[in-house]
Image: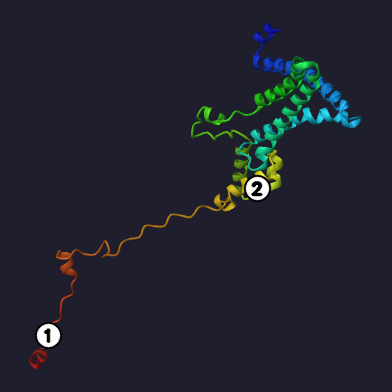
Amino acid sequence: MFGDVATSPDPERHIRRTVYVTVAIVAGFAFTVSYAHIYDLGRQHGQHGIAAKGMPLSVDLLIVAASLVLYIQARAGGSPEGLARFLPRLLLWAGIGATVAGNVAYGLPYGSLGAVISAWPGAVFAGLAEMVMVTVRPVAGEADNHTPIPAAQPAVPANVREAAEAAWAASVAGGNPLAETALASRFGIPRSQARKIRAAVPMDAVPAAGHPAASTPAAVTPPGPPSDAPVPGSPSAAAAVPARAPASANGSHGA
């Protein structure tokens, strides 16, 4: 098997397949044993029928659900705020604590060693579920390690949020802004995040197509004589002065 991986044109793909298959087998076994432990524990403490059958699912599948929510948040980019930031992490640790505690309680009547052995399947399932999510989750700061792109080429968005921001800016520049629902459905992001993207790049911040930017105002000529005016004291200035008419004789005697 490993010889085929080494000679394969895409060994990375085969390695990932092997890892995922192995994880799926181990996780399936650990989930089954953990389910049986919590189911029997519920039956011993008054849980019957659908309550006893559904209790293990509400514990172990909570880990999967919280891990998937964290994966979606990391894929969308940005930093969730308020309850969206703390609730998935809180439920993830609550699910891990509940499955480990339930398995320990099942094996506790058989001594400390029995408690440790019983806790192992629940701990393995929780660890594998989180390990898979960490493997596929985008690495923080991944964009900082990318090879710089020449200025002549457009930058490739590093995540879904940057792609949505670029699409929104392009739609505004084209004179056909994307609606909030269209932006959210196209990139698979929550409407609240689409609303933030639309607010971050307002429609009047990008010039619409067909509307050129305002032209630069013409330079103002400072006040002064025109460029073709004669320089004082030059022959042309003397010629430009009209000759004064001689005073009449009568006028001079009257003075």
Judged left or right of residue 49, residue 128 is left
Q: Amino acid at mark 1?
A: Ala
Q: Amino acid at mark 2?
A: Arg
Q: Is residue 218 above or below residue 97?
A: below
> Under tag 2, what secondary structure?
helix
What percent of the width, then of the height, locates residue 103? 78, 22
Judged left or right of residue 27, residue 13 is left
How far is disc 1 from disc 2 in space, using C-alphas?
A: 90 Å
Q: Nearer the viewer, residue 242 or 177?
A: 177
What percent of the width, then of the height, locates residue 31? 79, 22
How many numbered markers are drawn?
2
What percent of the width, then of the height, locates residue 181? 71, 46
According to the image, label 1 marks what residue?
247
Q: Nearer the viewer, mark 1 or mark 2?
A: 2
What percent of the width, then of the height, locates residue 242? 18, 74
As drawn, the label of residue 42 is none
According to the image, label 2 marks what residue?
195
